[in-house]
Image: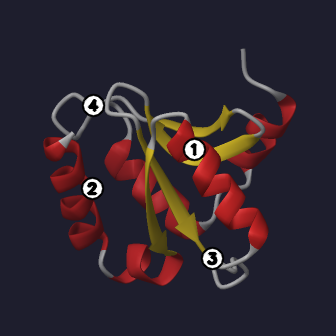
C-alpha cells in the first residue's frame, strides 16, 4: 500500500521526472518494471526497479550530492543492494534518449 508521502511525491513530480517516467513506465525497457516515488527504508526513490536492484534519482540544483544526507541516503540504498544512478534535471530534459540509453546499459549489466 502506498504511503501518503509517496502519493504526494507522485502528484508533484518535476518536469524531468515526468519525462523520464514516460519512458520507464509500462515495462518499456525490455520488460523491466519501474515504480516511481517508492519508499525504500526511510527514503523515497524517484524510480526503482526491484528486479534489477536499480534506483534512479533525478536531481535538481537544490541537491547537494556531497551533503551528509545524500551520502547517507546513497549508502543505505547500496547497503540494501541497490545500485544508484543519478541524473540532473537538465540532462533528462535536454538529452532524454541518452539518459534512457545509459539506464538501459546498466539494466543489461545487472
Cα distance between the residues tagged 2 and 1: 17 Å
Cα distance between the residues tagged 2 and 4: 11 Å
Left or right of 97, for residue 18: right
Badge 3 local density, few (<14 within 10 Å), some, or many (20+)?
A: few
Q: Which mark is residue 77?
A: 1
Cα distance between the residues tagged 1 and 4: 19 Å
Q: Earlier in the sequence, mark 4 or mark 3?
A: 4
Query: Going 21% across and 28% down the picture, which residue do you hit?
Result: 31
Q: Position of residue 100 (x, y in %)?
A: 26, 60
Q: Which mark is residue 12?
A: none
Q: Give the residue pinned by disc 3.
A: 65
Q: Secondary structure at mark 3?
A: loop
Nearer the viewer's eye, disc 4 or disc 3?
Answer: 3
Tell me, yes or no, whether the two marked residues, 2 and 4, touch with CB atoms within 8 Å.
Answer: no
Image height of 53 relative to 70, above or below = above
Cα distance between the residues tagged 2 and 3: 20 Å
Q: Position of residue 108 (x, y in %)?
A: 14, 43
Nearer the viewer's eye, disc 2 or disc 3?
Answer: 3
Q: Give the residue pinned by disc 4.
A: 32
Q: Earlier in the sequence, mark 2 or mark 3?
A: 3
Left or right of 9, for residue 71: left
Amino acid at each position: 500500500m502506498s504511503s501518503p508521502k509517496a502519493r504526494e511525491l507522485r502528484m508533484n513530480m518535476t518536469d524531468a521526472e515526468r519525462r523520464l517516467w514516460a519512458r520507464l513506465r509500462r515495462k518499456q525497457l525490455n520488460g523491466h518494471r519501474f515504480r516511481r516515488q517508492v519508499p525504500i527504508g526511510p527514503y523515497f526513490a524517484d524510480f526503482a526497479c526491484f528486479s534489477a536492484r536499480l534506483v534512479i534519482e533525478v536531481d535538481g540544483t537544490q541537491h547537494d550530492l556531497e551533503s551528509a544526507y545524500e551520502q547517507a541516503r546513497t549508502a543505505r540504498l547500496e547497503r540494501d543492494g541497490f545500485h544508484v544512478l543519478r541524473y540532473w534535471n537538465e540532462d533528462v530534459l535536454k538529452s532524454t534518449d541518452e539518459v534512457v540509453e545509459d539506464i538501459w546499459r546498466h539494466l543489461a549489466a545487472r
